[in-house]
């Protein structure tokens, strides 16, 4: 069944009115404490540095107040400020990275479970997040992480009555953006409830300039050069609903049962497209001098979770969690292209539907074994599926390529079973040891009407060993961890359907998945030291990592001259072994200012260095693509008066150069941008904030080069892509009533 958009305002208005009519108004002065994730030794304190020291794995916790204090409207904008996290890409292609490792090597969790496949980060409202937990390396609870995990923990129902309204308006490139968020919460007897509602409008445009050149022979003589002006645009209207409910039942003797459920529903309707204009500087004219694509799609995302938990008076805890996800994207696209004589040479219509569905069942039991041990035992089961239907129709046009008319269907399924065991061992008041083992079995099945069925089974073993010690007061806390994790290919990686750009070349090839892909496997060593040097008056964290990745997944370029519509194809494959190393420094502190002791300057800074190497690629600098050599973040916050505050931030990253298989090279230029904000809070429950993001920003520039052989001669293709960056101005109001 295909999802078609409905009048969003009528739909949400009916739900919202019904909830308000039933909303209880009884309030209590206490708030429910968040439930720690399995295997966590994080103590719930107000001091984030103390939490990090207390956790054997060195888990970094970013509180809700830190995420919201800069007035960001989107989750990815708030996460981009967090030390250690890199946000790459734009729009639906946004990706979170740890240690500069992306493409799925950083695992994003939602309440301790992998973010469902096909889920966009834009489908998770920032206001629904209670905190973010960052762990380096793999764990027995989440082995599908090579670089580490970013766990997004959503808000739980609060017994404290809450009525909050947030209004935000923004402008970028002269285009409007707006959002309204309503939060309600309360309690009735042993039950607590919460409701979040977000309505948003984002009208965005991205401009880019592409330069392409072809060089031939040993002298690299230019034979063709062209420039493309590209415009991508998108206007998305969305409504999100986040109802939450919890119930507690005390038991005789001090134990209790707790039941909770939370849901996320997001409906989005988008109207966008791409417009290209190509101008040859010399050489043959491009096949299409002007091209336009209109892209309309409707998205539905629903996730429901049911959790039952039992706590005994002796401190044991048993938990069952069931999560179900459904995400659909119904897309209609029409692409038209004209040649240098303004003749219509392409008129393609595509009607596509993509469905991602999953169900995850988690069982976990934690029990103290005396004063020194705590045992953590768990089991997981997951069934996930991605299904795609794609119907393409083209007429035969003079001067155009042979028309392609087809009805393709693709299906990728994953079944996963896992068992894990972990022992947390206290070696004294200042030392702890964590030992664990995870056994996982994966079954993948890829099939469709245009290729043969491919079935794979993988069995993976993931040991974890971590130690934390504080030799004596004043020397700080040392942590060392060894873990083995893996990365499972995404459904798109194993689905062999083609993605064909308008102009196919070695630097802009068609793309297709590979059903024979195997998972990446990695050993990781993570070390850190955390302390507070008295001479610096700051908290300091030093982190280092080393990862060996086997069966690393990269891209290879395939020449297929017989396929006129896609003579060059980029396909994923397992490329042997890769190494990645990183070093990070984080500092956080306060400085006295002339405004007085009540108005210190709060500051935090971080610097990350990263390098990688590919063993089986012979080139000058074989490395993982997109990994910046260094990344610097600086954030300053100053209270100007009792009701005013100001913030200034700097984000800068170094170049990323990588030689890849098939004679390809990718180089990303260094980038930087500033953020600034002015906040005003005249009274409790009322605040306003004016901010600017991506100010004084550099363009996102990437250079690509490919060396191939044509007619017995060496040929080099060069491309430079420059995405232009515009500042975003935002004004927001928070009102509690």
Image (spheres, helix red, strand yellow):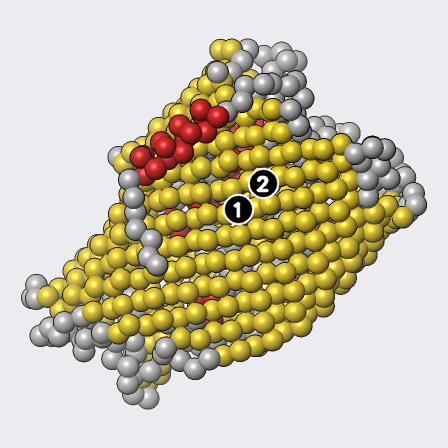
Q: Which SS class for mark 2? A: strand
Residue appearing at x 36%, y 32% in the figure? 14
Q: Residue at x 57, y 24 (%)?
A: 186
User: Which residue: 70% across, 53% down?
Assistant: 363
Between residues 183 and 213, which one lies in front from this camera angle?
183
Residue at image position (73%, 56%) is 378
- The correct choice, above or below, for 365 with respect to 728 in the image is below
Q: In the rendered image, which residue does mark 2 sit on?
A: 261
Do the CB atoms of the residues marked 1 and 2 lie less than 8 Å apart? yes
Left-right relation of 641 to 544? left
Residue 617 sits above or below residue 317 on the image: below
Q: Can residue 420 be seen by looking at this rendering?
A: yes
Image mark for residue 304: 1
Answer yes or no: is residue 651 visible: no
Check the picture and name the quadrant holding the N terminus.
Answer: bottom left
How far apart marks 1 and 2 lie (CA) works out to: 7 Å
């Amino acid at each position: 069944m295909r999802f078609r958009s409905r009048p969003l305002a009528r739909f949400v208005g009916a739900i919202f009115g019904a909830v308000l009519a039933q909303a209880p108004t009884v309030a209590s002065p206490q708030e429910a404490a968040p439930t720690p994730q399995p295997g966590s030794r994080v103590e719930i304190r107000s001091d984030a540095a103390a939490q990090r020291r207390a956790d054997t794995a060195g888990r970094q916790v970013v509180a809700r107040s830190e995420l919201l204090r800069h007035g960001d409207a989107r989750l990815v904008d708030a996460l981009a400020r967090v030390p250690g996290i890199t946000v790459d890409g734009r729009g639906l292609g946004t990706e979170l990275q740890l240690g500069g490792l992306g493409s799925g090597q950083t695992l994003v969790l939602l309440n301790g479970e992998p973010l469902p496949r096909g889920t966009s980060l834009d489908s998770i409202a920032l206001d629904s997040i209670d905190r973010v937990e960052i762990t380096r390396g793999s764990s027995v609870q989440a082995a599908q992480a090579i670089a580490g995990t970013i766990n997004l923990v959503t808000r739980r129902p609060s017994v404290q009555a809450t009525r909050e309204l947030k209004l935000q308006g923004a402008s970028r490139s002269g285009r409007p953006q707006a959002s309204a968020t309503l939060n309600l919460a309360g309690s009735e007897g042993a039950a607590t409830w919460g409701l979040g509602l977000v309505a948003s409008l984002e009208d965005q445009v991205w401009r880019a300039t592409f330069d392409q050149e072809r060089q031939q022979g040993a002298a690299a003589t230019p034979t063709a050069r062209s420039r493309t002006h590209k415009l991508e645009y998108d206007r998305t209207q969305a409504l999100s609903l986040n109802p939450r409910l919890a119930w507690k039942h005390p038991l005789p003797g001090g134990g209790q049962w707790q039941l909770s459920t939370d849901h996320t529903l997001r409906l989005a309707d988008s109207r966008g497209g791409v417009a290209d204009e190509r101008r040859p500087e010399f050489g043959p004219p491009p096949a299409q001098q002007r091209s336009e694509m209109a892209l309309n799609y409707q998205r539905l995302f629903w996730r429901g979770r049911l959790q039952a938990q039992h706590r005994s008076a002796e401190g044991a805890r048993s938990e069952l969690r069931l999560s179900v996800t459904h995400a659909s994207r119904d897309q209609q696209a029409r692409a038209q292209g004209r040649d240098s004589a303004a003749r219509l040479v392409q008129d393609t219509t595509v009607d596509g539907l993509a469905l991602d569905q999953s169900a995850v069942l988690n069982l976990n039991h934690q029990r103290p074994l005396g004063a020194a041990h705590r045992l953590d035992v768990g089991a997981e089961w997951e069934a996930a599926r991605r299904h795609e239907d794609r119907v393409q129709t083209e007429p035969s046009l003079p001067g155009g390529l042979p028309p392609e008319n087809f009805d393709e269907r693709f299906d990728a399924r994953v079944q996963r079973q896992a068992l894990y065991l972990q022992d947390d061992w206290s070696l004294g008041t200042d030392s702890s040891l964590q030992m664990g083992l995870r056994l996982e079995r994966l079954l993948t099945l890829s099939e469709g009407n245009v290729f043969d069925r491919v079935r794979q089974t993988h069995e993976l073993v993931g040991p974890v060993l971590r130690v934390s010690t504080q030799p004596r007061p004043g020397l700080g806390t040392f942590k060392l961890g060894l873990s083995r994790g893996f990365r499972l290919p995404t459904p798109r990686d194993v689905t062999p359907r083609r993605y064909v750009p308008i102009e196919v070349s070695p630097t802009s090839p068609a793309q297709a998945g590979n059903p024979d892909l195997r998972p990446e496997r990695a050993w990781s060593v993570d070390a850190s030291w955390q302390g507070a040097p008295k001479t610096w008056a700051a908290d300091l964290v030093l982190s280092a990592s080393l990862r060996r990745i086997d069966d690393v997944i990269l891209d290879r370029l395939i020449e297929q001259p017989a396929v006129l519509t896609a003579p060059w194809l980029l396909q994923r494959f397992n490329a042997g072994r890769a190494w990645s190393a990183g070093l990070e420094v984080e500092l956080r502190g306060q400085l006295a200012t002339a405004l007085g002791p009540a108005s210190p300057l709060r500051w935090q800074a971080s610097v990350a260095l990263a390098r990688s190497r590919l063993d089986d690629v012979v080139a000058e600098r074989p490395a993982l693509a997109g990994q910046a050599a260094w990344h610097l973040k600086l954030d300053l916050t100053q209270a100007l008066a009792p009701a005013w505050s100001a913030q200034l931030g700097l984000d800068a990253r170094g170049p990323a150069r990588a030689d890849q298989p098939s004679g390809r090279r990718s180089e990303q230029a260094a980038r930087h941008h500033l953020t600034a904000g002015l906040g005003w809070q005249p009274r409790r429950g009322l605040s306003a904030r004016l901010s600017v993001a991506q100010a004084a920003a550099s363009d996102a520039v990437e250079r690509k080069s490919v060396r191939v052989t044509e007619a017995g001669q060496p040929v080099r293709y060069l491309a430079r892509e420059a995405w232009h960056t515009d500042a975003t101005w935002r004004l927001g109001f928070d009102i509690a009533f």
